[in-house]
Each structure stands twice: as C-alpha cells, then as structure tokens.
Image (cartoon, helix red, strand yellow):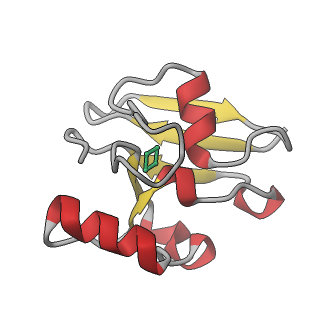
Amino acid sequence: MPMITFILPDGTRHPLTYDEDDPSVMHVGVRANLAHLPADCGGQLACATCMVDVAPDWQAKVGPAGPDEADMLSDALGEVPPGRRLSCQIVLDARLDGLVVTLPAKQG
Ligand code: FES
C-alpha cells in the first residue's frame, strides 16, 4: 500500500499507509490520531490547523497552494515558509506514495 511519513516536531517519524478512501493527507494523519494535527474544520478550508511542511524533495510533485489556501496560510502566518501547505488540500493519489511531511509545532 502507498505510504506517507509524518514527522512530528520532536522528530518522531510515523509512516502511515493510505488507500483510495483517504481523500487527503490530513485524513491519513487524523485517522492515526497524530498529535499536532487538530484539523478542527474537518477539511473545509476554514481553520488552518492542518498545516504541514512538505519535504523539499516532494514540493514540486505536491505543487503549490491554491489561491484560497494561500490566503488562509498568509492570514494565519504572515510570512509563509517554503513548502507549507494545508494538508486537507493535498489530494492523495498513487503519485504521492512515499511523501514526507513535517508537522509544525504550532498550528494556525
Ligand atoms: S482541516 Fe481545516 S483548513 Fe484543513
């Protein structure tokens, strides 16, 4: 099965499998009850509490934030670090097998 590795702020790595029933990166992390991923709005692009930092090697494949997502990140952070995305907006497919994301210590 395809896999995503979530890295917690303390460096702990959580490799998690996903399938076609998981619509987004956020859903995989929430299903595993990962700390630092409250995802308060359940993926409705309304909370900015599902932020991840996409590993540099994966940023081109994952792509940039869309306009609404980028606005939400700017509102939450001001300066948005490279690779920062809302994980509920990263749609999963087989191309993302092996993806690595880091959860920031502080969500929006
Ligand atoms: S879960 Fe709320 S914006 Fe992603």
Q: Is residue 78 left or right of residue 13?
A: left
Residue 28 in picture, x, y percent from top left: 63, 35
Residue 24: percent from the left, percent from the top? Answer: 65, 49
- Would you place residue 34 above or below residue 105 in this image? above
**Residue 39 against residue 99 in the figure, above or below:** above
Residue 40 place in picture, x, y as percent: 40, 34
Task: Identify the residue shown where x is 71% and y is 42%.
Answer: 3
Frontmost residue, 32 versus 11? 32
Image spot of residue 34 (x, y percent):
45, 24
The picture quadrant where one finds residue 80 is bottom left
Residue at the image point whose x is 83% and y is 38% from the top: 21
Residue at horizontal 44%, vertical 80%? 67
Q: Image quadrant for the N terminus?
A: top right
| Residue found 21% across the figure and 38% down from its top | 105
- Looking at this rendering, what residue extends furthest in the top direction? 33
The answer to whether 28 appears left or right of 69 in the picture is right
The answer to whether residue 64 is left or right of residue 79 is right
Q: Nearer the viewer, residue 13 or 103?
A: 103
Task: Say how many tags the image has.
Answer: 0
Quarter residue 15 falls in: top right
